[in-house]
Image (tube, helix red, strand yellow):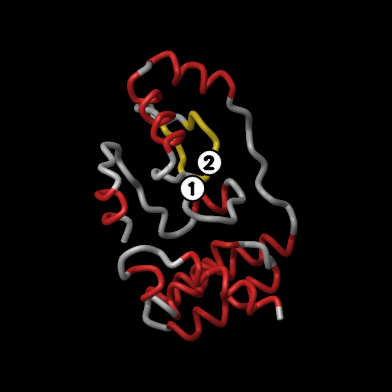
Amino acid sequence: MVKPWHDKANAEFTTLIDSQNISGNTYNLKAIPYGIMIDEAGRLVKHPFNINVAKKETIKMLETWLSDPTYNTRLLRDITPLKKSENPKVIEANARFQLGLTLLKIGKKQEAIIEWRKALELDPKNWLIHKQIWAVEHPDKFYDGNVDYGWQKEQLEAEKK
């Protein structure tokens, strides 16, 4: 699903898809898209970050990382450990999110959405859960051309009521 955006950006780097949200759980990520920079040795060199290849700063940072060997060394020197959430509600929300992914994979779409809605009650600011529900219920807003961010804002406003 990411290939059209990867190609449109003329990206020359490898893109990995974390369909099970392992990185999201590990790093307590609550929004997409995000980037994780891993060097050739398999080391995390930069904490996950909001990646927008339409922004010149993002492209410049990635180009520097790929072309300047000293930049990778600086990133490795500055990285600090991240803590996983210990909040029981967040842990349960993540488990329900995973269950929903499994249910969707085996064709149980409605059951998946029910689990994601329960997860969202536990972790209402988790945009990964919001977007997963929206993408399954309204794939045209995500996969037919550009992602409709205006529609997403309208959904957030409607959910607040």
| Secondary structure type for disc 1 | strand
Instruction: Give me the disc on residue 34.
Output: 1
Q: Mark 1, residues whose alpha carbon is within 10 Å: few (<14), some, or many (≥20)?
A: some
**Residue drawn at 44 percent across, 41 percent down:** 55
> Can you identify the residue that label 2 sits on?
48
Residues at marks 1 and 2, CA–CA distance in whole angstroms:
6 Å
- Cβ–Cβ under 8 Å for marks 1 and 2: yes
Position in image of residue 119 (x %, y %): 63, 71
**Residue drawn at 30 percent across, 49 percent down:** 6
- Amino acid residing under circle 2: Pro
Q: Is residue 77 left or right of residue 73?
A: right
Position in image of residue 113 (x %, y %): 52, 80
Q: Which of 148 and 81 is in front in this view?
A: 148
| Secondary structure type for disc 2 | strand
- Amino acid residing under circle 1: Tyr
**Residue drawn at 49 percent across, 53 percent down:** 22
Closer to the chain start, of discs 1 and 2, is 1
Vertical order, 112 against 39 (above or below): below
Q: Is residue 12 left or right of residue 34?
A: left
Q: Quadrant of residue 90?
A: bottom right
Q: Nearer the viewer, residue 124 or 109?
A: 124
Query: Where does the N terminus fall, quadrant-wise?
Result: bottom left
